[in-house]
Image: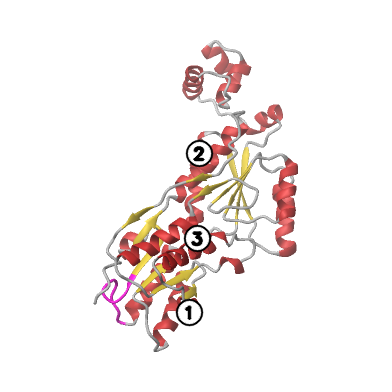
Amino acid sequence: MVGIEDVAREVGLSASTVSRALRDMPLVSAATKEKVRAAADRLGYVRSAVASGLVTGRTMAISVVVPSVSLWFYSQVIEGVDSVLRQADYDMALVNLGGVGPVRQRSFQRSLLRHRGDAVLALCLDFSADEREELRQTGLPVIVVGTPVRGLRFVGINEVAAGAQATQHLLDLGHRDILHLTGGAEEEGGLSSRVPQGRLKGYRQALRAAGITPDPSRVLKGHFSMSVSRAAVDALLDSGGPLPTAIFAASDEMAFGAILSLNHHGLSVPEDMSVIGIDDHEMAAPFGLTTLAQRPFDQGVEGAKILLDELSGKPARKTSLILPVHLVDRGSTTRKSL
């Protein structure tokens, strides 16, 4: 088996310098790192995480904490994180912290506080004040992807601005009676409510700026679920009451549910009702959904890079990273008919 000493002899450097180069330490020049990596690849050297851990005191793994792996957003973030960690010879330790009460506390204590990873990346999870303090005491770098969390850095989008932009798109098309499908995440254990709350706040801000008083009856819970959203719109359409002319869904999956319900009731999108979502889900194009595109894969990439930079000795990023969204018009919204 090829060892680090073999790579060192190949490039004429010390084993310690080769080790630092392979770990992407900042004190080694880019040219030396490239030379060492090329030699390691040529010789077939595979760095041992166990051996590195004995030297550095690290596990060579990042704890990625999720409330669920069933939603498209989470899987995209995880893929982005994994793409970065694999290149850096880091493993990903997936931790499901979506439970409540004693179940969540056991997971938190067992998987995060016992140093199973060198850093923590959490997806759309809120931590209690006690959990944030316990994390701080571990000294581990921590970042949240997908939602702002009090006292922690995060990578994501401006949820309020995104909600306002989606609503404004419908207002610009002449719509005044706009239904909002919100996430309802505040009812799910451990999952941050700031995403649905932020998008709801943006929806209300845009309406008020247009001189429209938000109607609480025009906000329905979709729970970030296609089936729940479809049922909610089904109930609205079956009620016999006045219908909105447009729907702003706080996620594409909820928008899909709305479109399925409208089609089932013989209504056309966008002729009878306009629909817009947020995400740019992989199924948005087949559905012909107009949406505000965010890039969860890129959010995972950026979150992982921030942690790895800090672990390599680079200055820690103190502030959050806000990434842009952009409108993708696929024809599910149109100007309100007179």
Residue 314 coordinates in the image, percent (x, y): 59, 29
Secondary structure of residue under mark 3? loop
Q: Quadrant of residue 243?
A: bottom left
Horizontal side of residue 114 vs 318, given as left or right: right
Point 50% across, 41% down: residue: 302
Label 3 or label 2, whichever comes before in sequence order = 3
Q: Amino acid at mark 3?
A: Leu
Residue 185 coordinates in the image, percent (x, y): 57, 66
Task: Give the residue number, with chain letter if any, for mark 3.
Answer: 71
Cα distance in 3D space between marks 1 and 3: 27 Å
Residue furthest to the left: 338
Q: Amino acid at mark 1?
A: Ser
Up-down relation of residue 241 to residue 93 (above or below): below
Q: Quadrant of residue 69?
A: bottom right
Q: Amino acid at mark 2?
A: Val
Point 49% across, 54% down: residue: 75
Where does the magenta region start and end? 266-274
| Residue toward you, 193 or 59 | 193
